[in-house]
Amino acid sequence: MTAWKVWAKRILIAVLLLLAILSFLPLWQTDRWWVRQWDYPRLQVACLLAALMFGLWLLEHRRSRTFWAVTIGSGAALAWQVSHFLAYFPLYPKEVASAANCPTASRVKLLNANVLLTNDRMGPLLQQIERHDPDIVLVLEANDEWVRGLAGLRNRYPYWLAEPVPNTYGMLLLSRLPMNGGIRHLVQPAVPSVRATVTMANGQQFILHGVHPEPPWPGDDSGERDAELVMVGREVRDEGQAAVVLGDLNDVAWSRTSRLFHEVAGTNDPRVGRGFYPTFNAKYPLLRWPLDHLFVSPHFKLVDMAVLPDIGSDHFPVLFSLCLVGDADQRKVSRTAPAGTEAEASQELSKGLQERSEEDRGQ
């Protein structure tokens, strides 16, 4: 084997081992940001593992023990990665059934747009609103400038809930449908969320939760985000009526936190069995994953969903059209989640509140 092939093989083996370690790293039950970050690029890491394993297969002809050890380890990591996002391929069974025929009065169309605080191009979002005519628009990272820029929509959307702040967590909820609710701060004083009761054209009501918790970043772990999602999930299950959770969760659909949320809330993900629908990062095509979500209680079917064109943000807007089926007040999940789920949720909530307390004390 020539010298360059020897070095190429060594580099491939080293990178494969590193990727295998990073693949399993999120198994560590911790809120550390540098662990939780590896929940996001599972599809990208899986593609790298497959490509590098193929490269090693081409370079290594002796099939040594090292070769087989690296191949088995990398193969296990690849299988582990794929197991997380397999449910988002179209052949997988759907969690949210499709609505073939839905009466107009039972439909609701929602648009979620993280506009990026530094983005001052409001025209592209206004064009998408004009084109798709959603019933409800949730604008994230909204500041005073965005509130002023969208003020012309008040005739079309007479119901507003707004907390414009300059910290990337401002929130603006616009609705054509009658809406009663308010802005809340569940875990962090500077991170708002919204809870509103929406009345549809057929007179039925559902609860809308708009959320945008903090992501795990250097110096800021995921505990507070996870705690907020647990609180919203418990509220959805406790209320038992038709509910929609919409927003930038700063988490991917296949993470442990998202799984826990669904188990706590009893909600379903319309992406399952349909596709990835990545919404972030709009700037880098090879580094994209689904961060903007809509989760629904079993009262809903899906009419359509689509990721919309670039609006100048680092997120793409996403549009969902739902059909409310049956009685919105009928409980369709049990009153309590399984004991193991509740125990895990309580632990996540406790850790998140402790993290919040430590930050308040400046630790």
Image: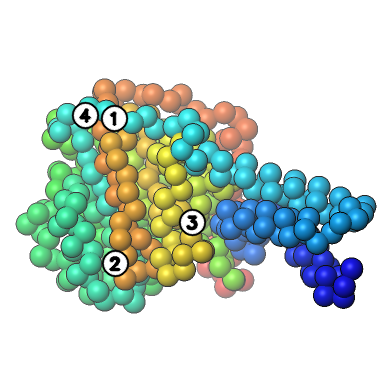
Q: Report the residue marked by disc 2.
A: 311
Q: Which mark is residue 156?
A: none
Q: Nearer the viewer, residue 269 or 344?
A: 269
Distance between the alpha carbons at the discs numbered 1 and 4: 6 Å
Distance between the alpha carbons at the discs numbered 1 and 2: 29 Å
Label 1 Cα crowd, 10 Å radius (few <14 / some 14-19 / many 20+): some
Amino acid beneath label 3? Trp
Amino acid beneath label 4? Cys
Secondary element at tag 3 = loop
Q: Which of 27 and 56 is in front in this view?
A: 56
Q: Report the residue marked by disc 3.
A: 289
Q: Tell me the residue at 18%/63% (across/down).
A: 126
Find residue 100 and report its horizontal and vertical position in percent.
Answer: 27, 28
Q: Tell me the quadrant of the picture where the N terminus can be found.
A: bottom right
Q: Which of marks 1 and 2 is nearer the N terminus?
A: 1
Left or right: residue 108 compared with residue 216: left
Amino acid beneath label 2? Ile
Q: Report the residue marked by disc 1.
A: 99
Q: Earlier in the sequence, mark 1 or mark 3?
A: 1
Name, please, the residue furthest toward the left.
Answer: 155
